[in-house]
Image (cartoon, helix red, strand yellow):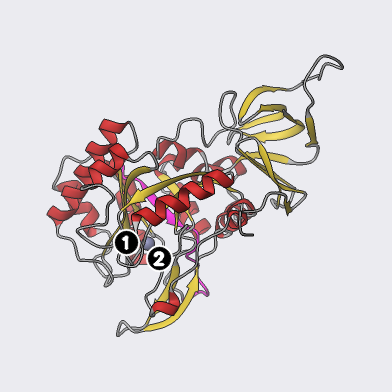
Amino acid sequence: MLLIKNILTYSPKSIGIQNILISFDKIIYISPCINIPDKNFPEITVIDGSDLMLIPGIIDLHVHIAGGGGEGGFNTRTPDLMLSNFTMAGVTTCVGLLGTDGTTRSMGNLIAKARSLQIEGISTYTWTGCYQMPTRTITDSARGDIILVDKIIGVGEIAVSDHRSSHPSDNDLIFLASEARIGGMISGKCGILHIHIGDAKKGLLPIFDLHKNSEIPFENILPTHINRNKELFKQSIDYAEMGGFIDITTGIKAENANSIEVNPAEAYSILLKNKISPYNITMSSDAGGSMPIFNQDGKLEKLTIGSIMSNIEALRDCVNGGIDLENSLIPFTSSPAKRLKLTGKGQIKEGFDADLLILDKKLNIKYVIAKGKIMVENYKQTVLGTFE
Ligand code: ZN
């Protein structure tokens, strides 16, 4: 058992100073006062939470856990992420995925990596597919993958408006969205078609068309990288105003005032000012994938790797930019949990999974608890991955 004492708690809603009792992997009791009996009671580890804050663990729905990239030749394939990449960044739940390369990367390898991270201590899921069409699957269909493979919750990331995509037609997208939706209906999962939007001029138009030309509800469609350029971001505000759901990439940052990118915190702030519900917005890192920069002729100029730390950095930027902590937390915690139908995740509540972060006043991560186990203690990792 683990008891966190006297800690300012954000569920993500502020619920004041609380004591949080954890047994194995669950939060079992939350109260302003908990007294441990002095005899005939199990041993309890106690963390003093005075002057600290407790928030739900971050849920990152877009991580290239088993590497990605490769757009600049074989030597540019990015490596697997390790357990401490996640825990040190406060990510206790992630959804892994393939990217551009569905040839040397496989769904089998992705599922194996997700399972290994789960054994090491965090919660993992995956999307099925990759950029290309027909997309990569384990069974004979995306629908079959969602229904039959426990880890798989939806389809993604399918690329549109990108020179690296298979340039899917409207009907291709409608077919895949139906596969995702029906797979989700039968298995009780979210059944989302998660769509990578590239830098091409048409931007979000294929998503507007998907909505206009089919019966697929908004809840089954989730475009991402919507802050990669200002034009696309403008379209995304319109799409969200219609009721659509959008995912901001925290790994995308504007380097200077002339950059085409929109900083994640700024994007979130503009969306809130446009009266978009925070529950129509999620944020994810795109970590582990390559962040290639192509010139106007489509030639690769520069390649970096997305960092999972970009989530907590974006959270801090939201707070420093004037958004209160409650609202800043939603797109990293309760919103993705709701969108992905991850019951027991994303909130601090009795009966929920004990996935928790303890932050100091500067919003640095002091402790990470994943499924009731202390993974980071006093800013240092206490649990390492198998090969770390
Ligand atoms: Zn992508």
> Is 387 left or right of 76, judged from the image as shown?
right
Residue 273 drawn at (x, y percent): 46, 49
Task: Report crowding for label 1: few under 14, some 14 to 19, many 20 or more residues within 10 A (C-alpha).
Answer: many
* Residue at image location 57% in from the left, 58% down from the top: 82
- Ligand 1 placement by image quarter: bottom left
Whether ligand 1 has any atom under 8 Å from the Cβ at mark 1 is answered as: no
Q: Looking at the image, which is closer to me, 319 or 199?
A: 199
> Is 144 left or right of 70, judged from the image as shown?
left
The image quadrant where one finds the N terminus is top right
Q: Give the range drawn in magenta.
A: 243-258
Asked if the stretch drawn in magenta spans residue 90, the answer is no
The amino acid pointed to by label 2 is Arg
Residue 61 can be seen in this image: no
Q: Which label sits in the foreground, 1 or 2?
A: 1
Residue 360 drawn at (x, y percent): 74, 47
Which residue is under mark 2?
228
Residue 212 drawn at (x, y percent): 16, 47
The image quadrant where one finds the C terminus is bottom right
* Residue at image location 23% in from the left, 42% down from the top: 143
* Residue at image location 40% in from the left, 39% down from the top: 339
Q: What element carries label 2?
A: loop
> Is 53 left or right of 76, judged from the image as shown?
right
Label 1, label 2: how far apart the Cα atoms are: 9 Å
The amino acid pointed to by label 1 is Ile
Q: What element carries label 1?
A: strand
Which residue is under mark 1?
197
